[in-house]
Image (cartoon, rainbow, N blue to C red):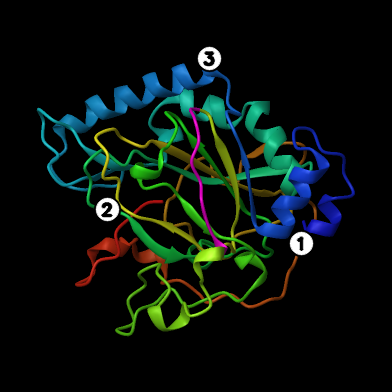
Amino acid sequence: MKPQDVLKHPAHVLTDAQRRAFFDHGFVVLPDYVPEAWLTRLRAAMAELLERSRAVTQNDGVFVLEEGHSETEPRLHRVSSPQDQHPTFWEFMTDPVMTDLAADVVGPDVKFHHAKLNVKSGKGTQGFGWHQDIPAWPHTDFSPVTIGIYLDGCTPEQGPLTVADGSHAGPLFSMYDDAGNFVVKIREKDLGWLTDDRIRSITGGPGTTLLLNCRAVHGSVPNKSAAARPLLLPVYTSADSFPYTPSPIPSPHQGDIVRGQAAKYASFDTRPVEMPPDWRFGYKPVWSHNKPQKPGY
């Protein structure tokens, strides 16, 4: 569903100003949005996954490890598809606290695409250069929205997600490096437009929530503080928006309608999108190339 059609429907969570800010700037931040009762449950679920990771010695389909990870000191950068690893995450992602919020920017009928939990352990080494999301999982329109929730909050020292204000309205950049590797990183030569006055650093207390347009340029630096910076990142789309490449982060829940009704027709935005590699033959993580682009927001 396109923005002009979304705006024909009443909002459920956002104010008119917040909704307009999302469409005008490519993001909007809701301080302390998620209730403490949910945060407590999500933290407990994350703690269980951290315990499971003690037995993991290298990156796999679920866990992306931070340097120094061990059985005695588990250190994670990411958990892929947390909704498939612990039922609390899926319960949260299908609760109206999330689906009503998504509906305010994608339309009343909401579909789930994928999710990740970027734990980003303290004293870490992994950030993520400037990039855009939609080239990794193209859709028939640009309705996909990532909703990021800081489970413990985020300070400037923790490598907060940063967004280039208004960049969603600009071009989509190549996510390939000069050697042809899909690194999900904009080349330095294409970043001359990115000045400091456009960069917004997203910080806030526990439950602070960010809605991020799929075209927005964003990234982060490593978390150099002592505390982890867990950021839960489910992605939703309009029900009438359809992916036309396999997902690099597959899930049995991909395509589930989590609010409203399934679509009978597809929505199309004909602006071009560079294609990712063919994920049918497996996902080669972006950090596995010779000059690795490190994972996570």
Q: Earlier in the sequence, mark 1 or mark 3?
A: 3
**Most foreground residue, 10 or 209:** 209
**Residue type, label 3:** Ala
Q: Which residues are magenta?
A: 198-206
Q: Which residue is mark 2?
A: 126
In the displayed structure image, the side of residue 129 where residue 208 appears, left or right: right
Residue depicted at x 69% and y 64%: 141
Residue 292 position in % (x across, y down): 24, 66
**Residue type, label 1:** Ser
Q: Earlier in the sequence, mark 3 or mark 2?
A: 3
**Residue type, label 2:** Gln
- Whether the magenta-drawn stretch holds residue 204 is answered as yes
Residue depicted at x 35% and y 42%: 158
Residue depicted at x 73% and y 41%: 103
Can residue 47 be seen by looking at this rendering?
Answer: yes
Can residue 284 be seen by looking at this rendering?
Answer: no
The single residue placed furthest to the right in the displayed view is 8
Tell me the SS state at disc 2: loop
Vertical order, 119 against 186 (above or below)? above
In the displayed structure image, the side of residue 267 where residue 126 appears, left or right: left
Please give the label number shown on residue 37.
3
Task: Identify the image quadrant of residue 226.
Answer: top left
Viewer-side label of 1, 3: 3
Q: Which residue is mark 1?
A: 267
Q: Spatial distance from mark 1 to mark 2, Cα to Cα?
A: 36 Å
**Most foreground residue, 196 or 269:** 196
Residue 259 position in % (x across, y down): 72, 35
Q: Spatial distance from mark 1 to mark 3, Cα to Cα?
A: 37 Å
Residue depicted at x 54% and y 33%: 208
Classed neighbour count for the residue bearing mark 3: other residues with Cα under 10 Å, few (<14), some (14–19), many (≥20)? few
Viewer-side label of 1, 2: 2
- Whether the magenta-drawn stretch holds residue 10 is answered as no
